[in-house]
Image (spheres, rainbow, N blue to C red):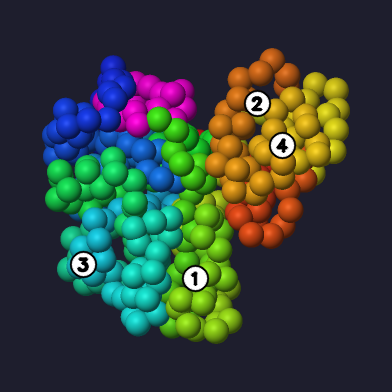
C-alpha cells in the first residue's frame, strides 16, 4: 500500500540557491517538489526510492499503470539506467539536453524504483535543458522521476500558480521561475529494435528519424508505454469541443489565426506560439463563468500534430481510472 501523503502548507519560492537547497533537502527526505522545465512544470522526486515515487502517484492521483519519465543530468547518467543502441545514442546526442524523451530497455541493476516503469521492461529518460531542473539534478545527484505537476488527467501546468491550483496541500514546495518556455510536454520515442512515436511534442518525429537513421522503421505502440498515452488526458474541468469556427451558446471560444474567439492561441496562426499558449489558454477558459469550452481548428502538421494530440485527449470522456 502506498504511504499516505502527509498534509502540507505548500510554499512557493522564487528560483535561487536557497530554493534549490530546500528542494534538494526535501527530495532527500523522500518528498516530491514542483520544479519548472523547458516543457511544463514537473513533480520531481527520487526515482530510486519506492516511497518517494509512491508519493508522486499519491499527490497526483495518478493510475499505477502509467509510467513516469526519469530526468537525468546527461547521457552518462542515462547510460547507468537504460541501454542505448546506436540509434538511441544518436538521438540523445542530437537532442539532449532538450524536449525529447527516449524509451529504451531498462538496464539490469539500474536501481530505479519498479513503480517508475509501471512494471515495463523499458524506461523513459530525458535530459532537460532548463537551468532550474538541471540545478536540482546537480544538487541531489539523483535521477529524478518528474511527471507534470498537476492532478492526473488535468491540464498540464506552465506556471507555479497552475501547480498551486491542483496540488496545494499535497506537496511541500513549488519553485517558481515564471512561465515555461515551450509550454508543451516532450516528444516521446521508443527506440528498441526500431523506432516508434509514443507522444508527439516540440521536436518532430521526422527530425528524430533523420538523426536515428532508421529510415521509416516504426512499430505501432500497444498499451500504455509512456506518459500521455491515456485516452483522456490534459483535460479541463469543463466539456471541450474541437474544430469550432464560432462559439455556441455558453461556450468560451479559444481562437487561432483568423478565428479570433474570446482568447487566441495565436492571432497570426503561428503553431509554435499556439503550442506554448495551449495549456495557459485552457487554464484561463476553465476559470471563466461559461460552462463549456470550444477551440478553433489547428492545422495537422509540424508541432500542430502535438497540439491536436493534446486537444483530442483533453476532449475525450474522462475514464474512471483517471483522477
Q: Earlier in the sequence, mark 1 or mark 2?
A: 1
Front residue of 319/38: it is: 38
Residue under label 1: 208
- How far, Cα to Cα, is label 4 from label 1? 29 Å
Residue under label 4: 267
Residue under label 3: 76
Region of the chain picked out in magenta, as a range: 159-177
Instruction: Tell me the element at label 4.
Output: loop
Which quarter of the picture shows residue 107? bottom left
Tell me if mark 4 has few (under 14), some (14-19) or many (20+) residues whose alpha carbon lies within 10 angstroms of its own.
some
Given this view, does label 2 or label 4 mark the residue nearer the observer? Answer: 4
Picture coordinates of residue 251, whole percent (x, y): 78, 25
In the picture, the disc for residue 285 is 2
Instruction: Tell me the element at label 3.
Output: helix
> Is 216 contained in the magenta span?
no
- How far, Cα to Cα, is label 2 from label 4? 17 Å
Given this view, does label 4 or label 1 mark the residue nearer the observer? Answer: 4
Q: Earlier in the sequence, mark 3 or mark 4?
A: 3
Tell me if mark 3 has few (under 14), some (14-19) or many (20+) residues whose alpha carbon lies within 10 angstroms of its own.
few
Amino acid at each position: 500500500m502506498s504511504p499516505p501523503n502527509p498534509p502540507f502548507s505548500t510554499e512557493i519560492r522564487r528560483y535561487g540557491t536557497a530554493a534549490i537547497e530546500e528542494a534538494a533537502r526535501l527530495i532527500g527526505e523522500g518528498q516530491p517538489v514542483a520544479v519548472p522545465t523547458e516543457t511544463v512544470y514537473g513533480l520531481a522526486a527520487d526515482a530510486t526510492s519506492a516511497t518517494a515515487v509512491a508519493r508522486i502517484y499519491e499527490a497526483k492521483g495518478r493510475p499505477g499503470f502509467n509510467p513516469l519519465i526519469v530526468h537525468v543530468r546527461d547521457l552518462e547518467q542515462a547510460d547507468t539506467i537504460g541501454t542505448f543502441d546506436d540509434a538511441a545514442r544518436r538521438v540523445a546526442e542530437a537532442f539532449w539536453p532538450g524536449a525529447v524523451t527516449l524509451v529504451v530497455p531498462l538496464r539490469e541493476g539500474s536501481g530505479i524504483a519498479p513503480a517508475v516503469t509501471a512494471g515495463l521492461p523499458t524506461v523513459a529518460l530525458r535530459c532537460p535543458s532548463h537551468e532550474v531542473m538541471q540545478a536540482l539534478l546537480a544538487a541531489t545527484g539523483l535521477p529524478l522521476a518528474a511527471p507534470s505537476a498537476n492532478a492526473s488527467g488535468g491540464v498540464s501546468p506552465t506556471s507555479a500558480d497552475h501547480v498551486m491550483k491542483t496540488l496545494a496541500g499535497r506537496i511541500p514546495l513549488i519553485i517558481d521561475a515564471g512561465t515555461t518556455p515551450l509550454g508543451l510536454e516532450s516528444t516521446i520515442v521508443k527506440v528498441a529494435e526500431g523506432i516508434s512515436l509514443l507522444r508527439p511534442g516540440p521536436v518532430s518525429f521526422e527530425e528524430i528519424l533523420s538523426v536515428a537513421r532508421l529510415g521509416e522503421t516504426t512499430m505501432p505502440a500497444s498499451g500504455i508505454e509512456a506518459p500521455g498515452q491515456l485516452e483522456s488526458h490534459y483535460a479541463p474541468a469543463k466539456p471541450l469541443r474541437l474544430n469550432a469556427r464560432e462559439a455556441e451558446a455558453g461556450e468560451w471560444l479559444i481562437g487561432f489565426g483568423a478565428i479570433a474567439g474570446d482568447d487566441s492561441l495565436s492571432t497570426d496562426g503561428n503553431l509554435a506560439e499556439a503550442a506554448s499558449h495551449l495549456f495557459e489558454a485552457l487554464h484561463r477558459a476553465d476559470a471563466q463563468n461559461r460552462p463549456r469550452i470550444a477551440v478553433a481548428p489547428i492545422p495537422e502538421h509540424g508541432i500542430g500534430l502535438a497540439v491536436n494530440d493534446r486537444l483530442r485527449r483533453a476532449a475525450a470522456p474522462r475514464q474512471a481510472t483517471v483522477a
